[in-house]
Image (tube, rainbow, N blue to C red):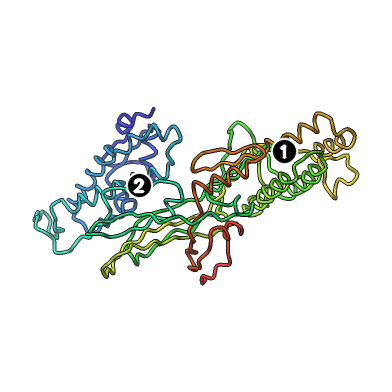
């Protein structure tokens, strides 16, 4: 387990750092976690105050800046959140979320120092040491001294509103929208749904992993967000294993032949083949939309990407009996995202096929078809039928972490969402403001003809 107290002794404040290394708050956070030695000076602390903590130190007396810098060192080391380092090491905490809580804590503490410390007037005469209140008002950024956690299933999060009562904020929950029957395509792109396909030739997992930003703000607040990166991450699953890329067309050809061969196997479930076809269709569309290295996807890799490249918002207004121009709203920003993981794709093109160029066929599928045509009772054929009918598809509710497999997996997870999570409230396009039903967006892979001005 990381010893945070010991690691902080490796963060040294020196009069002047000789290297040109850029040091920001994120650098210090990482150094503490990894136990690296890091030297910083007053220049670095000023940089952090101004850039990471958004404090305009140019308007502050140097003595107050010095107080802020010394306070910053202290508060960085005593942050209560360090007690959760074991959760981070176990993978129970996301780095970005944990770091952001650290940054917000330091913003609050620094502004507390600003509003509590004696006010200084900038000296214009050398040696002047007047400590009366300055006439220039220093405005500190207002940040709540606490973080509000609202947890629960989507049926709760999608239906909460805020009511102001006697100066207090009361959180209430409306009844959720009734579950609407979804098409397979809509469900595969529904929030909190993951599907794994595991067949003899390949194995992949597709997870709808939307990123939600929820916060309470004043009515009329201007919300600005940086432009989204289409590719969120490309992660290698096993460092010691090489990546093996395959083209979009190669996947298409294989899946097309797979569907034809499976359709000829005896006692195969036609409903399962249809379900599998929809899943594979989303898989190849993902590769096309990711568009990495001329539409390729590699084994031993996970790619996270912004499906649809659009951002959506829910804005829930606080109900107030009085006229309040500064009313409070609850905002929910939705960044649609898919994580696509290809664990295995052991497929070889059949070079002995006289029509090898058009259409392309594959060794394993040609062998399976040959066995089916000669003796459908062969073990390889019956095993494939059982795998397809019973075991090849597993669904997961990523919110509850509950898995559904077997021949009725799709019906089981659909019932789970209907009973526990209900449907989703409408969303607005962040740019053009047009309203959409979530099932319509899911069916269109979270995209729409945005009418926002370019």
Asked if the residue under mark 2 is in contact with the one under mark 1, i.e. CB atoms within 8 Å, the reply is: no
Q: Is residue 385 above or below residue 330?
A: above
The image position of residue 239, as x and y in percent, is: 58, 33
Between 402 and 117, the one nearer to me in the picture: 402
**Quadrant assignment for the N terminus:** top left
Residue sitting at x 58%, y 52%: 189
Closer to us: 332 or 145: 332
Residue 321 location, x and y as percent? 27, 67
Find residue 175 and report its horizontal and vertical position in percent. 43, 55
List the residue tagged with mark 2.
149
Instruction: Residue 308: name its quadrant.
Output: bottom right
- Tell me if mark 2 has few (under 14), some (14-19) or many (20+) residues whose alpha carbon lies within 10 angstroms of its own: few
Q: Which mark is residue 388?
A: 1
Query: Is residue 100 placed above or below 93 in the rendered structure?
Result: below
Residue 69 in percent (x, y) is at 24, 46
Q: Residue at x 54, y 44 (%)?
A: 416
Disc 1 vs disc 2: which is toward the camera?
A: 1
Q: CA distance from mark 1 to mark 2?
A: 42 Å
Left/right of residue 408 with respect to residue 122 in the rendered view: right
For label 1, the SS is: helix
* Residue appearing at x 33%, y 36% in the figure: 82
């Amino acid at each position: 387990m990381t010893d945070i107290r010991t690691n902080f002794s490796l963060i040294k404040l020196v009069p002047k750092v000789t290297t040109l290394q850029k040091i920001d708050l994120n650098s210090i956070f990482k150094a503490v976690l990894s136990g690296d030695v890091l030297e910083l000076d007053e220049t670095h602390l000023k940089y952090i105050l101004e850039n990471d903590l958004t404090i305009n130190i140019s308007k502050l007396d140097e003595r107050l800046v010095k107080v802020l810098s010394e306070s910053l060192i202290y508060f960085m080391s005593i942050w209560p959140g360090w007690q959760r380092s074991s959760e981070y090491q176990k993978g129970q905490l996301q780095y970005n979320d944990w770091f952001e809580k650290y940054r917000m804590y330091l913003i609050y503490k620094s502004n507390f120092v600003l509003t509590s410390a004696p006010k200084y007037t900038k000296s214009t005469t050398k040696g002047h040491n007047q400590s009366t209140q300055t006439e220039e008002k220093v405005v500190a950024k207002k940040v709540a001294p606490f973080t509000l956690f609202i947890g629960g299933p989507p049926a709760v999060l999608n239906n909460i509103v805020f009511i102001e009562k006697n100066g207090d904020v009361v959180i209430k929950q409306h009844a959720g929208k009734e579950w609407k029957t979804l098409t397979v395509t809509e469900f595969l792109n529904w929030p909190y749904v993951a599907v794994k396909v595991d067949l003899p030739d390949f194995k992949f997992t597709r997870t709808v992993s939307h990123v939600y930003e929820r916060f309470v703000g004043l009515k009329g607040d201007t919300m600005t967000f940086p432009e989204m990166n289409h590719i969120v991450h490309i992660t290698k699953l096993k460092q010691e294993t090489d990546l093996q890329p395959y083209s979009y067309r190669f996947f298409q050809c294989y899946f097309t032949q797979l569907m034809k061969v499976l359709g000829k196997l005896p006692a195969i479930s036609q409903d399962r083949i249809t379900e599998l076809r929809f899943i594979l269709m989303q898989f190849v569309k993902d590769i096309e939309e990711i568009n990495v290295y001329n539409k390729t996807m590699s084994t031993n890799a996970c790619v996270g990407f912004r499906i649809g490249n659009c951002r959506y918002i829910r804005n829930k207004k606080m109900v107030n009996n009085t006229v309040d121009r500064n009313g409070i709203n609850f905002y929910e920003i939705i960044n649609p995202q898919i994580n696509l993981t290809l664990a295995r794709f052991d497929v070889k093109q059949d070079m002995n096929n006289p029509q090898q160029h058009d259409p392309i066929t594959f060794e394993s599928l040609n062998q399976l078809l040959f066995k089916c045509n000669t003796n459908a009772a062969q073990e390889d054929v019956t095993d494939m039928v059982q795998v397809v009918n019973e075991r090849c598809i597993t669904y997961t509710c990523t919110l509850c972490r509950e898995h559904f497999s077997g021949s009725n997996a799709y019906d089981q997870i659909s019932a789970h969402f209907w009973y526990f999570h209900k449907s989703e409230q409408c969303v607005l396009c962040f740019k053009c403001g047009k309203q959409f039903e979530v099932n319509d967006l899911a069916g269109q892979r979270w995209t729409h003809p945005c009418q926002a001005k370019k």
